[in-house]
């Protein structure tokens, strides 16, 4: 029974890693579509939405089955309940990638406002946060999870910087308002991706240490 349970937990990890790989690809496609002004790339993101939704259901069902049939305790129970939460966070990251693509399609209907520098940088940080959060989960690495939490402030700072810069464009030329709004919304979508990665890391810390740090000031240290 123990060996079979270990195999089932391994399968659960593999499903989440597969899901993580898809959402990373969705982020990449969405941002490249924006940078290259390519609507075809933006539309490719939508193709992965159904797959993410099906994986979301599949992983939840697997977790419920493991809890019902194996009746795990202590760390194993925290691992499975953590996997359910992480599953939902990954699905929401996929949703944010879709939102980026939707805003990109609108943005591409207008002339370019400015060269994109901070937005791709912000997206790269957020994508790495997602990748590291899943690595922390698989390796049960609380320190890696903490390092991801610290990067959230950098993403927030870039979001604010992008907003301030775009505001100056709109003030000097009101005809850029629509494009600027799209870029502000995209920066918020990216910021939400980073937030979901921090949520995953908070779940990892709880899973490994049994310590709930949500809403605690410790996250800012």
Image: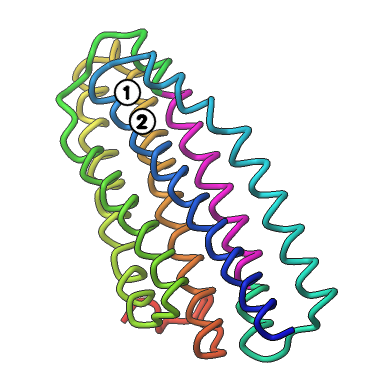
Looking at the picture, tell me which residue is in the foreground, 156 or 54: 54
Nearer to us in this view, 153 or 93? 93
Residue beneath disc 2? 29
Image quarter (top left, top right, bottom left or bottom right) of the C terminus: bottom left
Image coords of residue 183 (percent x, y): 33, 29
Residue 85 belongs to the span the image colors magenta: yes
Tell me if residue 67 comes above or below residue 63 in the rendering. Answer: below
- Circle 2/circle 1 CB separation < 8 Å: yes
Label 2 to label 1, Cα distance in Å?
A: 6 Å
Residue 15 x %, y %:
57, 56
> How busy is the neighbourhood of tag 2: few (under 14 within 10 Å), some, or many (20 plus)?
many
Q: Quadrant of residue 63?
A: bottom right
Which residue is nearer to you in this view: 63 or 87?
A: 63
**In the image, what residue occupies the spot 33% across and 76% down?**
144
The residue tagged 1 is 33
- SS for callout 2: helix
Does residue 207 lie above or below 150 as drawn?
below
Residue at the image point whose x is 73% and y is 61% from the top: 62
For disc 1, the neighbor class at 10 Å (few under 14, some 14 to 19, many from 20) is: many
From the top left corner, tell me how far across and down residue 54 is, in percent. 68, 41
Which residue is painted at 17% across and 23% down in the image?
114
Q: Quadrant of residue 103?
A: top left
Q: Is residue 9 above or below residue 11?
A: below
Span colored in magenta = 82-103
């Amino acid at each position: 029974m123990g060996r079979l349970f270990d195999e089932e937990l391994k399968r659960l990890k593999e499903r989440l890693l597969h899901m993580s790989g898809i959402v990373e690809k969705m982020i990449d496609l969405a941002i490249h579509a924006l940078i290259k002004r390519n609507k075809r790339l933006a539309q490719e993101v939508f193709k992965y939405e159904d797959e993410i939704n099906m994986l979301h259901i599949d992983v939840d069902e697997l977790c419920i089955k493991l809890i019902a049939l194996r009746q795990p305790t202590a760390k194993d129970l925290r691992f499975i309940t953590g996997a359910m939460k992480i599953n939902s966070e990954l699905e929401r990251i996929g949703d944010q990638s879709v939102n980026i693509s939707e805003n990109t399609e609108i943005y591409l209907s207008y002339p370019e406002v400015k060269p994109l520098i901070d937005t791709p940088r912000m997206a790269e940080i957020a994508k790495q946060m997602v990748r590291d959060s899943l690595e922390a989960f698989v390796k049960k690495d609380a320190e890696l999870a903490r390092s991801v939490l610290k990067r959230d402030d950098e993403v927030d700072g870039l979001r604010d910087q992008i907003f301030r810069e775009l505001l100056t464009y709109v003030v000097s030329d009101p005809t850029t308002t629509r494009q600027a709004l799209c870029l502000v919304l995209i920066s918020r979508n990216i910021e939400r991706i980073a937030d979901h990665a921090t949520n995953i890391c908070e779940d990892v810390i709880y899973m490994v240490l049994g310590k709930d740090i949500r809403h605690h000031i410790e996250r800012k240290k």
